[in-house]
């Protein structure tokens, strides 16, 4: 048995969530995955969509939203990773600056001003 495409699963989850809330999202993901399994299910899908009062345009829009959501989640993860990297770098630079300050302060207290300027 083939699995449904991720876009169809996500589209089903988005559409189910919009119609039925959190439970609908889970149900919609399952339905979306099942819809993508085979071309033979097209007629059943059309009948189910008609029964639910959904148009092909609504499903296409939900699919586009699902794909965009998936892309945005990947982008958010990349931004978070970049932020974490920059945060670690800033912390390391702060620690280095504190260390240099303490060394300069100690040199000034020892009367070795030239060493403090380095």
Image (spheres, grey):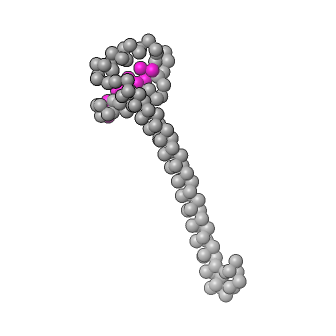
Residue 27: in magenta span: yes
The residue nearer to you, when weighing 17 against 63, is: 63
Q: Is residue 69 above or below residue 96?
A: above
Asked whether residue 10 appears in the rendered view, the answer is: no
Classify residue 59 by image quadrant: top left
Assign the C terminus to one quadrant of the image. Answer: bottom right
Magenta-drawn segment: 22-36
Which x, y percent locates residue 91? 55, 62
Q: Is residue 96 left or right of residue 56?
A: right
Asked whether residue 53 is drawn in magenta, I would say no
- Estimate the x, y position of residue 74 in percent, counting from the top left: 51, 41
Quick one: 23 or 96, which is closer to the camera? 23
Q: Is residue 60 visible?
A: yes
User: What secondary structure is the magenta-colored segment mainly?
Assistant: helix
Q: In the rendered view, does 1 fall on the left or right side of 45?
A: right
Residue at (61, 67) in percent of width and height = 96
Residue 39 rendering spot, x and y as whole percentages: 46, 14
Left or right for 33, reference 19: right
In which image quadrant can residue 13 be found? top left
From this view, report whether residue 68 is shown above or below residue 54: below
Q: Residue at x 32, y 34 (%)?
A: 18
Which residue does the image show at 64% across and 79% down from the upper left?
Answer: 104
Q: Nearer the viewer, residue 102 or 84?
A: 84
For the image shown, how many numbered marks are present on the structure? 0
Q: Nearer the viewer, residue 15 or 85?
A: 15
Q: Residue furthest bottom?
A: 111
Say left or right for 103 vs 32.
Answer: right
Image coords of residue 77 (percent x, y): 50, 45
């Amino acid at each position: 048995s083939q699995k449904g495409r991720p876009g169809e699963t996500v589209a089903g989850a988005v559409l189910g969530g919009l119609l039925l809330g959190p439970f609908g999202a889970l149900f919609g993901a399952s339905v979306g995955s099942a819809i993508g399994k085979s071309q033979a299910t097209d007629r059943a899908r059309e009948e189910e969509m008609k029964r639910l009062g959904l148009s092909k345009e609504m499903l296409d829009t939900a699919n586009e939203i699902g794909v965009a959501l998936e892309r945005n989640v990947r982008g958010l993860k990349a931004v978070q990773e970049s932020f974490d990297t920059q945060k670690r770098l800033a912390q390391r630079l702060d620690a280095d600056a504190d260390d240099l300050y303490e060394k300069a302060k100690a040199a000034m207290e020892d009367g070795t001003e030239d060493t403090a300027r380095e």
